[in-house]
Every structure is written in structure tokens, then in C-alpha cells.
Image (cartoon, grey):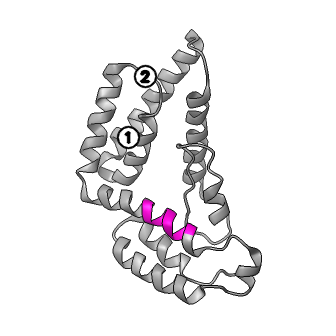
Amino acid sequence: MARTHKRGKNEYSRLRFFIGQHNWADQSHLADAMFYLDGCYFLEAGGDSPRIQKLRRAYAGRVFDEIEKDMAANPEKAYEWTVFLSKLPMSAKRMKVIKERLKELLEIPKVKLYKEGLRDMRKFIAKYFTVSSTDYKKKKGANKIKEISAKLYEKYKTISLGEIFRLLGEPVPL
């Protein structure tokens, strides 16, 4: 896991965990991942050809619709998409709206906690999860991982990251 986190190529690289052992993510997670990859294309797509501009605007409009839909029901997800959308090239008028949404979202306690939780997740993975398969086999730091995981679960149990922190403290079924 630590290696995967270190391999992020750029500021918008994103790795998210889901509950489900070593199974594939469910359909909604996979659809979000594909939608995210489409956005990465538009971040990397150079040039201002009319075709790229049109596709980028359509994509940004779809993301914005998702943000609006998720503002109340899933503000954590809305926050992630708003941050991502803020990196896409767009008109000043649209960017102003995105920044307003981001400000609104960051006033929601659950979103503040989620943002902090993402930071703690990166630190936790980098510090306590193996970068060597021999560390894993020797169960290096397993008790410390369990202890820290329990503390992070308590801190974040009211948001989606809580259960993931809890599960990261448990033995991995092989």
C-alpha cells in the first residue's frame, strides 16, 4: 500500500480504499473510477481545439451536476469532485462557482473531518504499512498498526473513512 501511495504521478493522483477484502470494487466505485480517468484525460489534453474544449465543457458540466446532486446526500464525494473539477481549465465564471461550492462544502463538519481523514490516511499508510514483503511476513509493527487504526477509527467513525481505518487494523485474510 505504501508503494502504491508513493507512486502517485501528479497532484491529482487518487487512491481510494473500499470495503471488500481483495474483491473488485462494486459497480458504483468502478464507474466513479472511469469517470475520474476521463477527467484525467482532460487535465492532460493539451491544446485548445474546439473539439477538446467542447468535450471538456460537457465533462465539467456532468461533474458539476454530480456535485450538486451529492451536496446534501454525500458531501464527502461532492468535496472530492469539487476539488478535482477546480483543476480543470474552465471559464472564470464557472471557476467562481466551483470555488463557492468548495467553500460551502468546507463549512460542513463532515467534510472538514473527511479532508483531515484523507491526510491522516496518507500519513498512516506511509508510516505503518510495509514497503517490503519480508516486513509483512514478519508481521512487523502489527500491534502498533492495530492500536493506531483503532484510534483513527474512533476519530473518523462518523464518516466513510472510519470503517476503512478499522479494517486496516485487522489481519488480512489470505
Q: Residue furthest bottom?
A: 143
Is residue 163 at least partly visible in the picture? yes
The dominant secondary structure in magenta is helix
Please indicate whether residue 42 sits to the left or right of residue 165 in the image: right
Q: Residue at x 41, y 76 (%)?
A: 153
- What is the span of residues highlighted in magenta in the rendered image? 119-126
What percent of the width, then of the height, locates residue 118? 44, 60
Dot in front, 1 or 2: 2
Task: Determine the secondary structure under disc 1.
Answer: helix
As drawn, 51 above or below 110? above
Do residues under tags 1 and 2 come within 8 Å of each other at their CB atoms? Answer: no
> Which amino acid type is marked by label 2?
Met
Q: Residue at x 59, y 13 (%)?
A: 51
Q: Residue at x 39, y 34 (%)?
A: 65
What percent of the width, then of the height, locates residue 35? 56, 39
For label 1, the residue is: 67
Q: In this orientation, which residue lies closer to the viewer: 28 or 109? A: 109
Is residue 23 a member of the stretch shown in magenta? no
Please indicate whether residue 14 sits to the left or right of residue 113 in the image: right
As drawn, 81 above or below 119? above
Q: Quadrant of residue 38?
A: top right
